[in-house]
Every structure is written in structure tokens, then in C-alpha cells.
Image (cartoon, grey):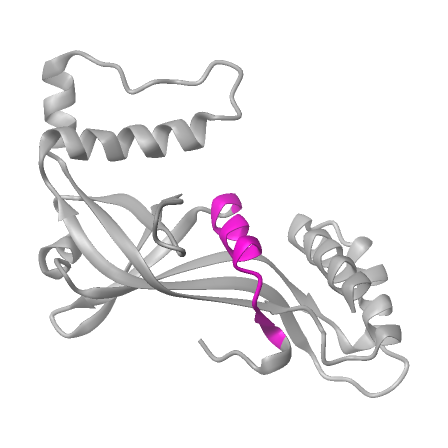
Amino acid sequence: MYIPKHFLETDLEKIKKNIHENSFGTLVSTVDELPFATHLPFFLEENKSEKGTLFGHLAIANPQWKNLEEKEVLVIFNEAHSYISPNWFDDFGVPTWNYTAVHVYGKVKLVREEKALFEILEKLTKFNEKDFPIPWKPEMPEKVKQSYLKAIVGFKIEVTKIFGKSKLSQNHTAERRKKIIDNLKKSDLEDSRKIAFLMEEKLKKN
């Protein structure tokens, strides 16, 4: 990912928070020497590694898993994004797009053993059910459980590199940024209002 210096996010805890809050990511590798991507839910586990470990699973019918073992992959997480109109400036401007994103690199270890695979499902379920009044638990008859486990391949990715980008008009003047924020707040789009909030946070720190 191309990251100009003023858009580089250096706060690792903030980057991890972005992953936790936007955990539906994109797993990128190669299949038959061509780029291949799968959109998946992930769980980032904090552990002895400073950067953590990502867990997930693929459908066994998905060819991507077949050449993942010990390969380095890219996982992309996106947060909010919004179009920025030059009409919002009194002086000259050009159209652009503000957004935040995290790119994670790491080596894959496939998980096929039943107990370890089910533990991955439990991690994902517990994480995604945590805000429900009555969280659903992956408790089911053994026969049903077996049929589900045979249909998937689990994986874990020991994170080796992690990059965060927050393109929030940091290369504009404070006056311009305030005008962008004011206009984004008027939007009917939730993402645009989220970008306004993130821009305000960034502006307060500068």
C-alpha cells in the first residue's frame, strides 16, 4: 500500500482497534499464479507476538486454501471512506477520497484438526456475538458439527507486518479541513459522517 508520510498511522493500538471494529476483511494470495481474494470475517488475537495472530476459515470448495500453507499473504481491512468535493473550498481544489485502511502481512498455518478448527469457530462466534443480549453459542449435535467441520479449512496468520493509513486531509490547511468536516456532517451517508468524526479527532491532535 502506498502511504505518503502524512497519512501513515503509527499508533499500533489504534490500528488493532480498527481491525477489531472492522473485522470483515479481504484475504489476498495467488491461485494459479493470479491474484485471488476472499472476503472473510477475521478475529485478531492478542498474544506474545506484538502484532498478534489472525484467525479465520475458508470453504473447502474454495481453491485459495490449497496453496496457503507457510505462504505469506495480505489481509486488507477497510474502515470508513467518503468522496471529498472541491465545491467545499473557496479556492481551487480537485476531487479526492478520504479513507482509513489497514494492511496486514503474515505467514499462514492451515488448521484441519477437529478440535483446533472448532476452537477457531468458537473464537469467531464469541467475538461477533459479544454485543447481543443473548449470544448464540456453537453448540450442536455431534453429527451436525462434523458435517460443518468437514466443509471448511481453518487458518491462523502470525502477523509479521502491519500498516495503517488514515487519509484524512492532513495535507490541507486547518481551515480547509474544518470546511470538509462541516460538509461531511451534513451527509446522509454514515461513512461520510464517520470520516468527519475521524477528521475531527485528527485535527484536535495536530
Q: Residue furthest front?
A: 48
Q: Nearer the viewer, residue 123 or 145?
A: 123
Q: Quadrant of residue 94?
A: bottom right
**Residue 98 appears at what percent x and percent y?**
64, 68
**Residue 157 appears at what percent x and percent y?**
26, 54
Q: Where the C terminus falls, by quadrant?
A: bottom right
Q: Quadrant of residue 66?
A: bottom left
Which residue sits at x=19%, y=73%?
34
In the image: residue 77, left or right of residue 131? left
Which residue sits at x=13%, y=35%?
151
Q: Where the N terminus falls, by quadrant?
A: bottom left
Q: Nearer the viewer, residue 159 or 100?
A: 159
Q: Residue furthest bottom?
A: 92
15 to 48, vertically: above or below: below
143 to 154, vertically: above or below: above
In the image: residue 166, left or right of residue 40? right
Magenta span has 143?
A: no
**Residue 41 appears at what percent x and percent y?**
36, 43
Which residue sits at x=88%, y=86%?
91
Q: Which residues are magenta?
A: 7-21
Which residue sits at x=26%, y=64%?
73
**Residue 182 appears at what percent x and percent y?**
85, 60
- By secondary structure, the bulk of the magenta-drawn segment is best described as helix
Q: Quadrant of residue 67?
A: bottom left
94 to 72, vertically: above or below: below
Q: How many marks?
A: 0
